[in-house]
Image (cartoon, grey):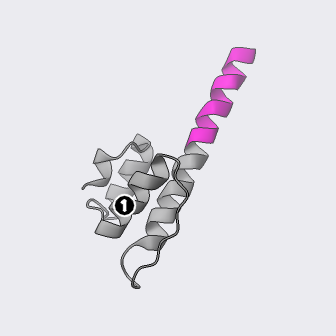
Amino acid sequence: MNFSELNLNQDLIKGLEAAGYEKCTPVQEQVLTCGLSGDDLYVQSQTGTGKTASYLVLMLQQLLNLLMVTLCLQLHQL
């Protein structure tokens, strides 16, 4: 699965592609699919399978979601 197939912010996808990330590893696919749907995660896998990157992508996505909500609320207050 490609990162672009996931429900990620387009700027995050562009950043991933610019860093050379296009295809998810199997671990990343499972972590991102479950994490984006709100599931709690516990992942155990060999070093180098992409666990840390997938957790960072999830955190960045959550921060971007929070930023968008905050901006929308601020615009409605104007």
Residue appearing at x 39%, y 72% in the figure:
50
Could you tell me the amino acid type at mark 1? Gln
Q: Position of residue 22 (x, y in %)?
A: 27, 59
Q: Residue furthest right?
A: 77
Q: Which residue is mark 1?
A: 30
Q: Which residues are magenta?
A: 65-78
- Position of residue 58 in the picture relative to residue 21 (left or right): right
Categorize mark 1 by other alpha carbons within 10 Å: few (<14), some (14-19), many (20+).
some
Residue appearing at x 47%, y 46% in the figure:
37
Q: Position of residue 6 (x, y in %)?
A: 34, 47
- Secondary element under disc 1, as helix, strand or loop, is helix
Residue appearing at x 63%, y 39% in the figure:
67
Query: Is-magenta flag for residue 66?
Result: yes
In this rendering, the answer to whether 23 lies above or below 69 is below
The reply to whether residue 25 is visible in this rendering is no
Magenta segment, principal secondary structure? helix
